[in-house]
Image: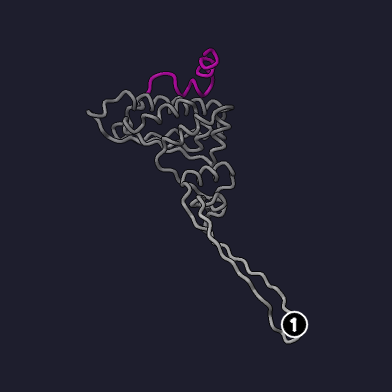
Amino acid sequence: FTSTIDVRNRCVVRELISGESDIGPEMAQEGKLIIIDLPTLLHGEARVFVQVLWKYCMQRAQERRDVEANPRPVFMVSDESHLLAVKQDQVFQTTARSTRTAMVYATQSITNYFSAFGQNSESVVHSLLGNLQTQIFHQQTDIKTNTYAADLIGRTRQFLFNATSNYESGDWVESTMGLRGNQPASAGMNEVYEYEVQPSVFAGLQKGGAPN
């Protein structure tokens, strides 16, 4: 708590969140577009603190509002969301639909979330992802993400066919005349439950840029 107070009273953070302001999270419920333009890679930890604080205030404002009186849908977009991820995101996402809030999280891989939430965070990450009803995957080389995507799509009953053919040479007369011996063949079919889309497929999707 002392560390949080210290951050709020230093440098840019103090300038950004102290004093009077003519903007608040409730304005999104009136149709206003609020952009927190503080790239974390350029501005460091202080900007991360401000963005997480804004996200938290937006979530609380959504939870407090009366959706019967004001049913306007509100969306929140978090780019590079793993840099701003906190456990409150998972808690809020469990009730986001009832607050008529659409959360959009963009990240390179779910491994980033495991790293952001720390050790033993698998249940938190999967709870967060499980409450995101629409998930979009692009070209990906992260093994955990590709396996997760394949598991999400699921497995289906599939039939695998196999066939074998063995050549058995005949006597020396047949060999001299160029005749083949017996060729016994066999065929079979196995029923398996396999990925509808293999994890390797996601590694071969198109990348961004001018060609695509």
Q: Nearer the viewer, residue 40 or 109?
A: 109
> What range of the chain is rendered magenta?
1-21
For this view, does 97 lie left or right of residue 122? left
Query: Taking 24 as reference, is 163 above or below it?
Result: below
> What is the basis of the colouring in this image?
one colour
Where residue 139 appears, x then y in whole percent?
A: 54, 50
For this view, does 59 lie left or right of residue 108? left
Tell me the element at label 1: helix
Residue 101 occupies quadrant: top left
Which residue shows up at 51% across the image and 40% down it?
107
Tell me how many marks there are: 1
Q: Is residue 129 magenta?
A: no
Where residue 83 appears, x then y in whole percent?
A: 53, 32
For this view, does 92 lie left or right of residue 108? left
**Residue pushed farthest bottom?**
177
Q: Which residue type does callout 1 highlight?
A: Ser
Which residue matches tag 1?
175
**Residue pushed farthest left?**
69
Query: Taking 185 as reference, is 47 above or below it?
Result: above
